[in-house]
Amino acid sequence: MTPDERTYLCWHCASEQGLAREIDPTTLMNSEYQLGKFVKHTVVDPIFKLAGVFKDPEVSTYEKWVVNSVASGCVVLTPNRTHAYVFVASQQVGVTYKHGSFHTAADAVKVVLPTSPVRVHAYPISSHVIAAKKCAKCGRPVAG
Ligand SMILES: [Zn+2]
């Protein structure tokens, strides 16, 4: 899959399609999978080729980012009918690392696998990923 095959929806249009929603933050540590992802995205480990790491490793902060992203982020739709949320935080939320070395500053949060109560998790990314993307429905910039 290439990035070009992805479709983006602004928050407004995602909201109309029922994709902007509430998520229970207590579901974020339901599984070993999710705990592993939380550690991966709060502790720098050079074993990972690329990883976004939150600057604040508190569970409550992590939960807040997930709740905000799912309620207020734009939506990325992939050809296999999964979706993800990207929330531009307008502040630095973390750093992305390549093999433990600084790669980019991260000012957005991505929430993936939101429909799975045992796999949904989040990580920081750079907002440049969605900076030039337009909403597939209304044509407005999704990061706007
Ligand atoms: Zn739109």
Image: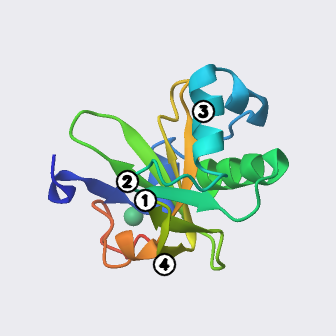
| Residue nearest the viewer, comparing 135 with 138 | 135
Q: In this view, does 15 lie to the left or right of 103?
A: right
Q: Which of marks 1 and 3 is nearer the N terminus?
A: 3
Q: Quadrant of ligand 1?
A: bottom left
Three-letter amino acid code of the residue under disc 4: Gly
What residue is pinned by disc 4?
144
Q: Is residue 120 above or below residue 129?
A: above
Residue at the (16%, 52%) spot, across then down: 5
Residue at the (61%, 54%) spot, across then down: 69
Residue at the (51%, 41%) spot, across then down: 18
Whole-angstrom CA distance, mark 1 to mark 4, is 32 Å
Nearer to us: label 3 or label 2:
2
Nearer to us: label 4 or label 2:
2
Q: Residue 36 carries which label?
A: 3
Q: How crowded is mark 1: few (under 14 residues within 10 Å), some or many (20 or more)?
A: some
Nearer to us: label 1 or label 3:
1
Q: Which of marks 1 and 2 is nearer the N terminus?
A: 2
What residue is pinned by disc 2?
49
Q: Judging from the image, what secondary structure is the residue with disc 4 in?
A: loop
Q: Judging from the image, what secondary structure is the residue with disc 3 in?
A: helix
Whole-angstrom CA distance, mark 1 to mark 3, is 17 Å
What residue is pinned by disc 1?
99
| Residue nearest the viewer, comparing 61 with 45 | 45
Q: Is residue 78 left or right of residue 39?
A: left
Q: Judging from the image, what secondary structure is the residue with disc 2 in?
A: loop
Q: In this view, does 27 lie above or below 98?
A: above
Q: In this view, does 22 lie above or below 54?
A: above
Whole-angstrom CA distance, mark 4 to mark 2, is 31 Å
Whole-angstrom CA distance, mark 1 to mark 2, is 5 Å
